[in-house]
Amino acid sequence: MQQPSEPLLRIEGLEKSFGGNKILNGIDLAVAPHETVCMLGPSGSGKSTVLRCINWLETPDAGAIFLRDQRVGCHEDGKKPMSDRELSEIRARMGMVFQSFALWPHLSVLQNVMVAPIHVQGRPKTFVREEALAMLDKVGLSDKRDAFPSSLSGGQKQRVGIARALVMKPEVMLFDEPTSALDPELVGEVLQVMRQLAREGMTMVVVTHEMAFARDVASHVAFLDQGRVAEHSTPDAFFTAPKTERARSFLKRYTRGS
């Protein structure tokens, strides 16, 4: 019998508060290599905060995060924080795609994709350019390489964001509601790229309100409610027979809205 894969990403007892308001209240989650885990839940349930804690854009109040066997953000004792250089190195192993694109407006599409591997990873410009062009081709934007972000649609900007993350050769991709800022007709082009990444075996953690995507693509669904993982199951089990009333109410609301 094949043994289950060791987690590529592991979260243990994650807690985070803002101004006395507890947003995360003991999150436990494990993501195996090549899995797509979709985090679902109502607004304010802590989904985006989990992602921001994973790559230490927010510092957790308690708990631990591991990428493979390496603790993220601090050393093994949990007390000594990582240096900026150490943190930069581990962040480079986790590609992040934001809601709001976060592209440099003064750089071309190609330059946006090239800047991090050159300046963060110190890779040769010639090789990075070839890889960046390949990633733009992968997301269907080869013809936009010399364009500037202001001339792109929202869907195109988000696909540039995906290419920019992929060119860093991450071990895991983190998507924070990547379609939430898009007009409805542009959502499909971004989800198509993400579906392809899942088929290719990219490990992904996706915060999303796209229920059809989660049902079709997720290996596991984590339903968050009030800062906890209220349910963690396969998409078939979650969408056909949710265990909690909160999940049933959530799904009814999104079914009516679709």
Image (tube, rainbow, N blue to C red):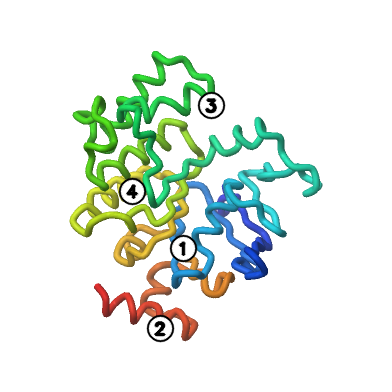
Check disc 3 and report its element: helix, strand or loop.
loop
* Mark with earlier residue (1, 2): 1
Name which residue type carries label 4.
Met
Tag in front: 1 or 3: 3
Mark nearer the viewer, 4 or 3: 3
**Residue 35, position in %: x, y?**
46, 52
Which label number is shown at residue 120? 3
Give the residue at mark 1: 39
Label 3: few (<14), some (14–19) or many (≥20) C-alpha neighbours in 10 Å: few
SS of the residue at dot 1?
strand
Q: Is residue 250 visible?
A: yes
- Other residues around mark 1 within 10 Å, as few (<14) / some (14–19) / many (≥20): many
Evaluate whether residue 7 shows in this view: no
Cα distance in 3D space between marks 1 and 2 = 16 Å
Instruction: Identify the amino acid type marked 1.
Output: Met
Q: What residue appears at the point 62 percent right and 44 percent down from the top-left corner?
A: 68
Badge 2 marks a residue whose secondary structure is helix
Which badge, 3 or 2, is on the more N-terminal residue?
3
**Residue drawn at x 37%, y 41% as measured from the top left:** 162
Amino acid type at image mark 2: Ser
**What is the C-alpha distance between the residues marked 4 and 2?**
27 Å
Q: CB under 8 Å between callouts 3 and 2? A: no
Do labels 4 and 3 touch, CB within 8 Å?
no
Marks 4 and 3, how far apart at CA: 25 Å
Residue under label 4: 194
103 shown above or below 257: above
